[in-house]
Amino acid sequence: AQSVTQPDIHITVSEGASLELRCNYSYGATPYLFWYVQSPGQGLQLLLKYFSGDTLVQGIKGFEAEFKRSQSSFNLRKPSVHWSDAAEYFCAVGAPNTGNQFYFGTGTSLTVIP
Amino acid sequence: DTGVSQDPRHKITKRGQNVTFRCDPISEHNRLYWYRQTLGQGPEFLTYFQNEAQLEKSRLLSDRFSAERPKGSFSTLEIQRTEQGDSAMYLCASSLIGGGNYEQYFGPGTRLTVT
């Protein structure tokens, strides 16, 4: 069965510090991988995606993620966090080449302290 | 491109009442998805459409739930005889399948509170 694990429910970082949010997945094959961000009371905004090729992908707002097949992981990183990055972050997987539904993790809530 | 829109943004209803939500996808997108998100959880898939055809339904979509996309454009999600357990954020997403595009774009959601 497909599943996505985000082991950190909540993370607090200082503004300007680096950030890494963890995501592990269980899937029959290499899925398509996504990171979304959700601000309070809002929908989800796509940060970045991985389909194939270069395992380090760049996204919006200075975020990047690295796909590691051997670890079934797709961790999100940012070198210097801004106060506006405080939000909920969701990792998601989808079946390749199908456009079928996504499976989401339970999310990581990010707090940024000045 | 105005993005995915949902109406209403908030709905408060009494248990046992029927509610209907609307989703307008990005205009050229051929797939439309409904998800449900409860507090502290990630979105969970409910159903999706390719044009006007409903291709898959989750087991979360009980008989009280029905979704339509009559002309392959907007979609409605109706919940009959609402229960307190239906309280959640209902998210709509759309995508354009083909040409290597598989990302889903989400609307702002409809927050349902059943009292």
Image: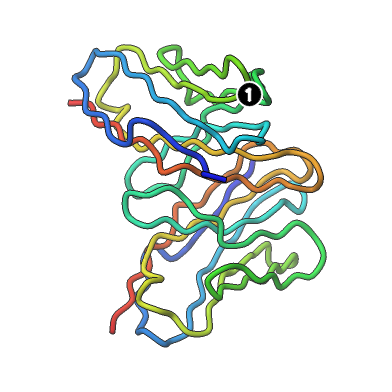
Q: Which residue is found at the position 17% from the left and 26% from the top? A: B115
Could you classify mark 1 by the number of other residues whose Cα lies within 10 Å: few (under 14), some (14-19), or many (20 or more)? some
Q: Which residue is found at the position 49% from the left and 56% from the top? A: A90
- Which quadrant of the figure has residue B47? top right
Q: Chain of mark 1?
A: B
Q: According to the image, label 1 marks what residue?
A: B56
Left or right, B15 with respect to B9, comes to left
- Which quadrant of the figure has residue B50? top right
Q: Residue A60: percent from the left, percent from the top?
A: 57, 68
Q: For the residue labelled by badge 1, is the local secondary structure a helix, a strand or a loop?
A: strand
Front residue (pair A100, B74): B74
Front residue (pair A30, B35): B35
Q: Does residue A111 sit above or below A80 in this rendering?
A: above
- Which quadrant of the figure has residue B22? top left
Left or right, B77 with respect to B71, comes to left
Q: Residue B12: percent from the left, percent from the top?
A: 21, 28
Outermost front residue: B1
Q: Which residue is found at the position 62% from the left and 37% from the top? A: A101
Q: Does residue B42 sit above or below B87 in this rendering?
A: below
- The image quadrant where one finds the N terminus of chain B is top right
Q: Residue B91: percent from the left, percent from the top?
A: 45, 37
Q: Residue A76: percent from the left, percent from the top?
A: 56, 70
Query: In the image, what residue type sits under mark 1?
Result: Glu
Q: How is the image coloured?
A: rainbow
Q: Does residue A25 sit above or below A81 in this rendering?
A: above
